[in-house]
Image (cartoon, rainbow, N blue to C red):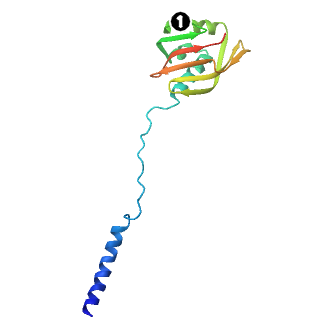
Amino acid sequence: MNIKVKLLVLLIVLAPVLAACANGFLFATATPTVVPTPTVDPQSSAKIVKAFWDALGAGDLEAAMTYVDDDITCTGFCHFKGKQVFQSYLQGYLDAGYVTKIGDLKSIGSIVTYSWEVSRNGLFVRRGEDDEMMQVEEGKIVSWQNYHR
């Protein structure tokens, strides 16, 4: 009988210990997957292009040029390189009474496409989509491609 009491005491003492050890043993516990937090806003290129056109639409060429790289290139309808030439081109555009509004921005990395609508002195001129794109690198527009006339 003495042996039965000892076994019972041993069972009472060991049962909680074994239960605590086996708690996570039979069933795997989920561990959270570490995912790095993106440091670059995936829409930052689109935001820069939008800010450029918004400033230009407000007639603020100086503010618009803050988004333009010194070595910007323009291809397609326009063929030039450099910030000064680009600024002269845009000054003529504004002096002629043109305003461009953009929408439906799509960004794939540094490339931004958008739809656009041009008016002159408040009157609608034309609109288009999928025929203009800008490329942004390090927070500046480095390339503008437009394929409309």
Q: Give the residue drawn at x 50%, y 27%.
A: 109
Compared across the picture, whether 64 is left or right of 39 comes to right
Q: Give the residue drawn at x 34%, y 69%.
A: 20
Name the residue that disc number 1 marks: 80
In the figure, 16 relative to 101: above or below? below
Tell me which amino acid carries mark 1: Phe
Most extreme residue toward the bottom is 1
Callout count: 1
Q: Give the residue drawn at x 41%, y 63%.
A: 27
Instruction: Give the quarter of the figure containing the N terminus.
Output: bottom left
Q: Secondary structure at mark 1?
A: strand
Instruction: Give the quarter of the figure containing the C terminus.
Output: top right
| Of the pair 82 and 109, the residue shown nearer to us | 109
In the rendering, at what x and y percent does residue 79 appear? Answer: 56, 6
In the rendering, at what x and y percent does residue 122 appear? Answer: 72, 15
Q: Give the residue drawn at x 43%, y 39%.
A: 37
In the rendering, at what x and y percent does residue 74 appear? Answer: 54, 10
Q: Residue 39: which quarter of the image?
A: top left
Compared across the picture, whether 43 is left or right of 122 comes to left
Q: Residue 4: which quarter of the image?
A: bottom left
In the rendering, at what x and y percent does residue 117 appear? Answer: 68, 18
| Of the pair 64 and 13, the residue shown nearer to us | 13
| Of the pair 77 and 95, the residue shown nearer to us | 77
Most extreme residue toward the right is 123
Disc 1 packing (10 Å; few <14; some 14–19; many ≥20): some
Compared across the picture, whether 7 is left or right of 44 comes to left
| Of the pair 35 and 71, the residue shown nearer to us | 35
